[in-house]
Amino acid sequence: MAMEREIIFSDDVDLYLNELAIVLFEKGYFCFPESAQAYVDGIIDFMIENIGIRPGRVAPPYFSQYGPNLEYIRYPANKHTSWYGFYQQVVNRFYVWHITNNHVAAQYF
């Protein structure tokens, strides 16, 4: 019997994602709070559905500050923004330690 894959977001990532919709709405990226929340939900859903299914890439050295042996997966949210989820695999568990986007972290790739 195969072990079920489990995606676990760190407390820091949970907090970041919970605040992200508010920040995106307040900065005017979305006209409605519900639209901003749907955008963030899309990031979360992508990570849950794809980490451990699609192959990850070895994280650049800069991101080792978030944990050892990290891999990442890229979510192209739109033609201007990609989100990156950095995770560590321990057997069938995938711990997401950091999430960022190309506007913040492009220089590290």
Image (cartoon, rainbow, N blue to C red):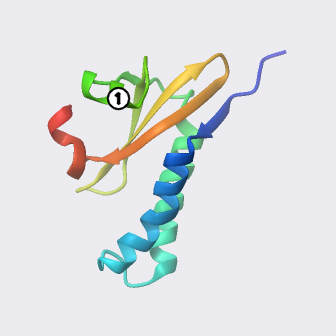
* As drawn, 37 above or below 93: below
- In the figure, residue 106 lies in which quadrant? top left
Position of the N terminus, as image quadrant, is top right
Question: Helix, strand or loop at disc 1?
Answer: helix
Residue 103 position within the rendered picture, expressed as x and y whole percent measured from the top left: 21, 52
In the image, is 73 to the left or to the right of 42? left
**Front residue of 9 and 77:** 9
Residue 30 position within the rendered picture, expressed as x and y whole percent measured from the top left: 36, 78
- In the figure, residue 49 lies in which quadrant? top right
Three-letter code for the amino acid on which mark 1 is drawn:
Gln
* As drawn, 70 above or below 84: above
* As drawn, 1 above or below 53: above
- In the figure, residue 31 lies in which quadrant? bottom left
**Front residue of 25 and 31:** 25
In the image, is 87 to the left or to the right of 63? right
Residue 46 position within the rendered picture, expressed as x and y whole percent measured from the top left: 51, 46
* As drawn, 36 above or below 96: below
Residue that carries the numbered disc 1 in the rendered image: 65
Residue 47 position within the rendered picture, expressed as x and y whole percent measured from the top left: 52, 42
